[in-house]
Image (spheres, rainbow, N blue to C red):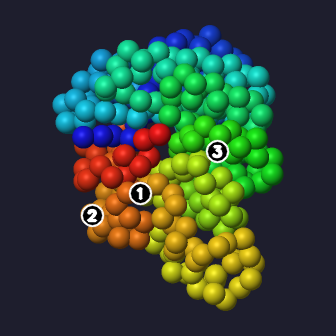
Amino acid sequence: MYDLHTHFIPSDVYDWLKENSRTIHAQFEQKDAAKSEFLTINGKWSFELKPLFLHAELYLNSQREAGVSHSLVSPIPQLFLYEFPSEITNELADVYNRSLADWTASQPDRLSALATVPLQNPAKAADQLKAACKNRLKGAIIGPGCGGQMLTDDFFVPFWEAAEETNAIVFIHPLLSEDARLQRRMMPNLIGVPWETTVCATDILLSGLLDKYPHAKILLAHGGGFLPYQIGRLDKGYNQWKPVSAALQAPPSEYLKRFWYDSVLWNQAALEYLLLMAGEDRIVPGSDFPFDLCAWPPKQFNEKGVQSLMGN
């Protein structure tokens, strides 16, 4: 049984955050006596530092108790630090990636991991990705862009070339949407997170990037956002408008089968639809453990998707 969407903060990373708290404007606050302290970076992205995020044995025991035999560990999206100078982000990436490489090396049957990279500097991001893959990490987790740049912009070519060269997993995981219309009723999380994935994934699909970098394994969080469920609209646009079809070699619904998707949907009918549209070899079990909105324990089905994503 696998869980390919989990998050963790190694002790070395926590220590770095404490030591550099002024530099990255980190606040550690006890907001609720019944909960652990919260971490806020640069005035936003606040989240609870649950013990499950910080204690390796607690994390492993919780996965084991749920029946998970192997977990893919990702850095915390709130710690991407894309808004800071790349030297700072790269320093944290060094610490994070080394710590995860050491941890997974000590538990090879139980753990694999992804790196974090300074995406705001694609050349440095490419170097981090290559180094991580040499250190037996499986790829990298990234946001859906940064600094107003979309992942299909030429700005990110060095990163995609490195992902292609290393056959890396590129796990696209958004943060809360900052759309002003959504700043109420938890909508930045409820629909803002999948919306950010939808915009990013649709842009990638229509850009031709999947043909240009066929060996980069793009994994979309939370079932691919809303993209799979509106693919008929994209197919209609493909048949109707040249700007939609210009960069593509097949209808959008065929490219839907070129991404991978986690199973974090909380709805069996939605998962069955995704399996139908993308194929069993493109869906992987995931939970988003241990965030509040985690699908726990992860939904299990055949391991075709795990084998196609995690295999070399």
Point 77% across, 54% down: residue: 153
Please, what is the three-letter code of the amino acid marked with disc 3?
A: Glu
Residue that mark 2 sits on: 268
Q: Earlier in the sequence, mark 2 or mark 1?
A: 2
Q: Is residue 33 visible in this depiction of the protein?
A: no
Q: Secondary structure at mark 3?
A: helix
Residue found 57% across the figure and 73% down from its top: 252
Q: Position of residue 41 (x, y in %)?
A: 62, 30
In primary-sequence order, the first of circles 2 and 3 is 3
Residue with the mark numbered 3: 164
Q: Position of residue 282 (x, y in %)?
A: 41, 57
Task: Specify which label sits upstream in the sequence, 3 or 1.
Answer: 3
Query: Label 2 vs label 1: CA separation?
Result: 16 Å
At horizontal 81% and vertical 51% (from top left) the residue drawn is 154
In the rendered image, residue 177, in percent from the top left (x then y), is placed at: 59, 52
Residue 91 horizontal/vertical position (percent)? 68, 19
Seen in the image, is 96 located left or right of residue 32?
right
Please state which amino acid type lies under the numbered disc 2: Gln
Using the rendered view, name the quadrant where residue 7 is placed: top left
Amino acid type, residue under disc 1 in the picture:
Arg
> What residue is pinned by disc 1?
282
Label 2 sits on a secondary structure element that is helix
For the point 31% across and 26% down, the residue is 110
Cα–Cα span, label 2 and label 3: 33 Å
Q: Nearer the viewer, mark 2 or mark 3?
A: 3
- Mark 3, Cα crowd under 10 Å, few <14 / some 14-19 / many 20+, is some
- As displayed, is residue 179 above or below residue 274? above
Tell me where residue 78 sits by quadrant.
top right
